[in-house]
Amino acid sequence: KNTLRKDTTPSTIMKVHFITLILPVLLSSAFVPQFISKRVVGQKSSGLFSTAQSEIEKLRQRAKELRESAQRDEHSVHLAQAEKKAKEDGKTDQLIHALFFEEGAGSLVDRLHKKNLSIDTLERIVDRLDEREVIAEGKEHVCLVEKDGKATFERVSKRDENELAKIQGKIEDLIEGVKVLDEEFRAKNGQKHVSHTEDQHWGSDKRHVRLTSRAHEIRREREEQFQKRLEEFYEAQRLKKDNPAPPKVKDDHGFIP
């Protein structure tokens, strides 16, 4: 009894009351640093994630811009090449007109004498005559066209009977005309030595042989390309037949996806 009374003195009661008041404060303050730490870490992680996302978007945008720039550059190169070819074709077409279609200029042999064309120029004429014949036959080809003030490329396949009648057989006519020049050259010079430079530029007395080989070569290459495309088409049809698409099935709502 004396001990109980001693423990319940006003001083002891005050101490207990003080501890009761201060303990929740101490406990709550003990957890504050951890909470703040977690919150700060969370904020840092969120910031890093946002920064990473921003960098990824920048890289994607940059890759897109580079891809578009490469496509524009490629188109510009193709366009420049096509424009250059168009100019060269225009000059060659003028020679073709002068040799075959110009009125009052004598025979083809006379015109060849007058023009005195190099073997390289004669080969370009053979190439261009073949190209024009293919286009006139209506075989698909790519050409440069202008739309809304901009140059672009289009696939074209339209038969032109008038052009075909005009151009067909002109390669053979040219080779025969050049053959006459070669025979004249041989008769005039005999076994006279011809320098390598003259032979490469003028073709000496073998120009008709080179033109014949040229015509055969470009026709062979075209036939091989046609056969290759034909085989690719048949192969695609065979794969389609051997691997048919799965049948479309309606879903639970009666719709076909």
Image: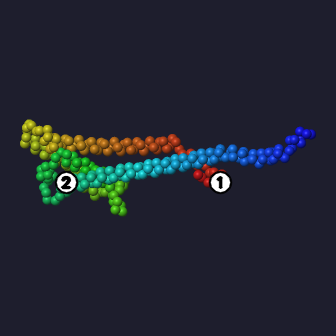
Q: Name the residue under label 1.
A: 253
From the viewer's perspective, tell me whether residue 92 is left or right of residue 9.
left
Q: Is residue 145 above or below residue 233?
A: below
Q: Residue at x 84, y 47 (%)?
A: 10
Residue 17: give x, y in percent of width and height.
80, 47
Q: Which amino acid does label 1 sit on?
A: His
Residue 103: give x, y in percent of width and height.
16, 59
Q: Mark 2 points at which residue?
A: 95
Q: Do the residues labelled 2 and 1 touch (CB within 8 Å)?
A: no
Q: In which quarter of the image is residue 196?
A: top left
Query: Of 190 and 204, which appears nearest the observer?
Result: 204
Q: Residue at x 54, y 49 (%)?
A: 50
Residue 239: give x, y in percent of width and height.
48, 42
Q: Is residue 62 above or below residue 189?
A: below
Q: Which residue is drawn at 12% across and 50% down?
A: 113
Residue 123: give x, y in percent of width and height.
21, 46
Q: What residue type is labelled 2?
A: Leu
